Image (cartoon, grey):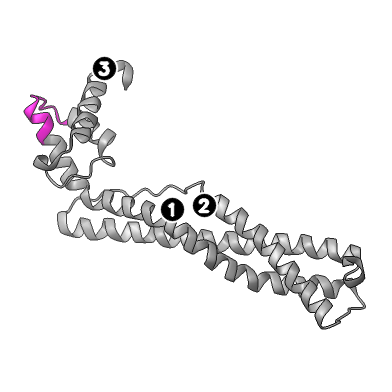
Amino acid sequence: MLGTLIPEDAFVWTAAVMAITSFIVIGLLFYGRYTRKKKEIVKAAVKKYEETNLYISPKMKFDPAIVLFWIGGSILNVLFSMCVLILIVGHLAVTFESHILYILVGFIISFFVAVVMYLITQVMANGILDAKAVKNFLKSVVSSPKTRIIVGTVCKKLGIMDQTTVDRVYDRVGDRIRSASYDELTPDEVLIINKAIEDSKDPSRQ
């Protein structure tokens, strides 16, 4: 039945063009989303620097899990776009003399549908990955000066006065402490800091 609607060669090339278009368009849109979020982190760091004169270099790693949304969205886009093309050709009884026209129409459909599919997958990504990730990044940047003070307080109470050691401990736990002050430290955070102090004292763990 499919062969009566779209010539086999045209179908194969159209599907290939749709796939390439989907991967490129959705991939670029997700990359743009990543760079925008990265700029938000930098802005947060700069704002904190203006308040404290302490600049914390923001680091935002690309979450590999986002690749699943990229690939999944691209595959769904190809399937949906192909259904739209078949619906147009079959329902409207449209036929093209040249195979190039099938490919061109397929490209146009997949391009615009890719934008819609990206918006759908982005909502899913925001809910599952992005919201949590960006929240942690921002919280890490904003709370870093407080965390440094907390680590310094713990080290001081343990008789560790060497600033190099304190800095080394902070580097190990800076992104894992969420308490706003020393009195708010949770038991898990105390264990994390103590473990970092022990590792800093042991040369074999450096």
Is residue 1 something one can see in this rendering?
yes
Position of residue 101 in the picture relative to residue 117 (left or right): right
Label 3 residue SS: loop
| Residue highlighted by disc 2 | 66
In this view of the protein, which residue sits in the foreground, 55 or 98?
98
* Pointer 1 residue: 129
Q: Residue at x 66, y 64 (%)?
A: 77
Give the secondary structure at mark 1: helix
Q: Residue at x 58, y 71 (%)?
A: 116
The answer to whether residue 23 is seen in the rendering is no
- Front position in the image: 35 or 164: 35
Q: Is residue 185 above or below residue 140?
A: above
Q: Can you give x and y, in whole percent of width and height, for residue 7 in the image?
A: 91, 68
Counting other residues with Cα less than 10 Å from the Cα at mark 1, is it few (<14), some (14-19), or many (20 or more)?
Answer: some
Residue 176 screen position, x and y as percent? 27, 40
**Circle 2: element type:** helix
